[in-house]
Image (tube, grey):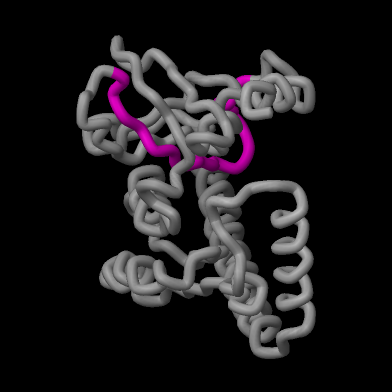
Amino acid sequence: EKHQFKHAVKDFVGESLPLKKEQGVKAFAVCSKYDEFDPQKKLSPFILRTYESPNKQDALDGTCDIDFPSACHATSSIPGMVDLLKINHNGEKVVLADGYFVANAPVAIAIKEAQQLWPRRKIGVVLSLGLDPSSCEIVHRPIDLARLHSPDLVFHRVLAFDALRGHNNLKHNQESNSLLESKTKHFIRNSHGERMLLKKTFDALASRDAKTSSKLHHRVGDDRDMW
């Protein structure tokens, strides 16, 4: 039942677990937001972050001051299936729903977040897991712009066309989700071309990690010499 969703999440992950994490990988999820008292119910992106936004003036609207079960609730909220989540944000009551309605393939948002977190660092790899073939053009546009700043950027979009055939993105139930997962795994494991592309992507990621690590070690050594 849709009314039981949030309670089920709380039972699974724990009620007091905060979304914000001081350590670890920085992550975010995209929701759709509208003002509760807006008669037009105009939707806009709302970012649920595990970190404080470093540049709040230019950052997309969002928060890290929310608990993890509520974040799961918000990103799964689809009218008629799971209740929309209402929160107080900057003194206003806003309503949050699944990000599908404003950014089903949020590559542009991911690039903007990365550039705000690390403004002097070039973007090395962008891996996109797609469910909507019609969004390919929208996805490639921000990649082309990002390559003006990061010309060596490696972009890989995994899109299992066979798995998506006949799948309805708005139809969420255990049977359809399990079938989609099974078909996607089969595609990745058995598509020679996709496996080669994934290898290239992960090799590029490992190479950049090694270069970053080497630079960090070098800087630490320099600092020690100074001290």
In this view, the residue in front, 108 or 168, is 168
Residue plotted at (30% across, 70% down): 141
Asked whether, in this view, residue 54 is left or right of residue 200, the answer is left
Q: Quadrant of residue 53?
A: top left
Q: Is residue 47 visible?
A: yes
Asked whether residue 147 appears in the rendered view, the answer is no
**27 part of magenta stretch:** yes
Q: Position of residue 111 (x, y in %)?
A: 38, 55
Residue situated in front as seen by the camera: 6 or 140 = 6
Q: Position of residue 7 (x, y in %)?
A: 70, 19
Is 69 situated above or below 99? above
> In front: 115, or 43?
43
Residue at image coords 35%, 21%: 94
Residue visible at 67% across and 14% down?
A: 16
Q: Is residue 187 above or below residue 51?
A: below
In this rendering, is residue 14 above or below 129?
above
Q: Is the residue 117 above or below the residue 123 in the image?
A: above
Give the residues drawn in magenta, as a range. Answer: 18-36
Q: Locate the N terminus by quadrant.
A: top right
Q: Quadrant of residue 158?
A: bottom right
Question: Does the stretch in magenta take in 118?
Answer: no
Which of the 4 image quadrants contains residue 168?
bottom right
